[in-house]
Image (cartoon, rainbow, N blue to C red):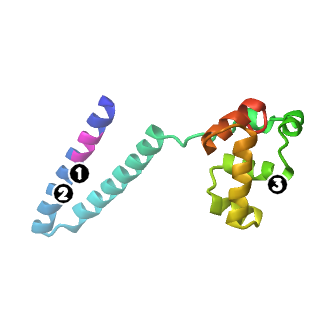
Amino acid sequence: MKQTVVGFGLLIAAILALLKISEYTYLSGSLDTELILGGIAIAFFVLGTYLNKKMNPPKEIVIDSAKENFVVDEAAIIKLGITKREYEVLESMNKGHSNQGIAEELFLSESTVKTHVSSLLVKLDAQRRTDALNKAKAFGLIP
């Protein structure tokens, strides 16, 4: 953190010095000095861009391999009496979709989705959707 503050402080000081020199060259009418200052400004721009990329490398995307290798516990689905459509609703709930979002994704009416959600809550013995998702994860129904 200290290096960053000192580095940017020096860059600001250099820019202020360049502005003062530029003001002097403008008043004296010397164009050659302005071209040199323009080149220096471009060099500082490139240096700043390089330092920014070095200090803030792109973030790696981590894919949870546990989700990729997840196997649904079919026996638990049969034991709980969850239908195929209810399981599809459960998967959409796990993605964080609202009732309306689930209805659009599965081409159902919103009232049908509410019915399936209520049925899932009863079958999973849950009070809320988050409870249902936690219990479904415990049963091995969703990753």
- Magenta region includes residue 23: no
Which amino acid type is shown beneath numbered disc 2? Leu
Which amino acid type is shown beneath numbered disc 3? Arg
Q: Residue at x 46, y 41 (%)?
A: 56
Q: Residue at x 70, y 34 (%)?
A: 135
Task: Give the x, y percent position of residue 111.
Answer: 69, 64
According to the picture, the residue beneath numbered tag 2 turns out to be 19
Residues at circles 2 and 3 in contact by the CB criterion of under 8 Å: no
Mark 1 and mark 3 lie on one chain; the one further toward the N terminus is: 1
According to the picture, the residue beneath numbered tag 1 turns out to be 15
Q: Which mark is residue 134?
A: none
The boundaries of the magenta stretch are 8-12
Quadrant in which the N terminus appears: top left
Q: What SS does tag 2 mark?
A: helix
| Other-residue count near label 1 (Cα within 10 Å), few / some / many at <14 / 14–19 / ≥20 | some
Image position of 28 with respect to 67: above or below: below
Q: CA distance from mark 1 to mark 3?
A: 64 Å
Residues at circles 2 and 1 in contact by the CB criterion of under 8 Å: yes
- Magenta region includes residue 9: yes
Quadrant position of residue 8: top left
Quadrant position of residue 59: top right
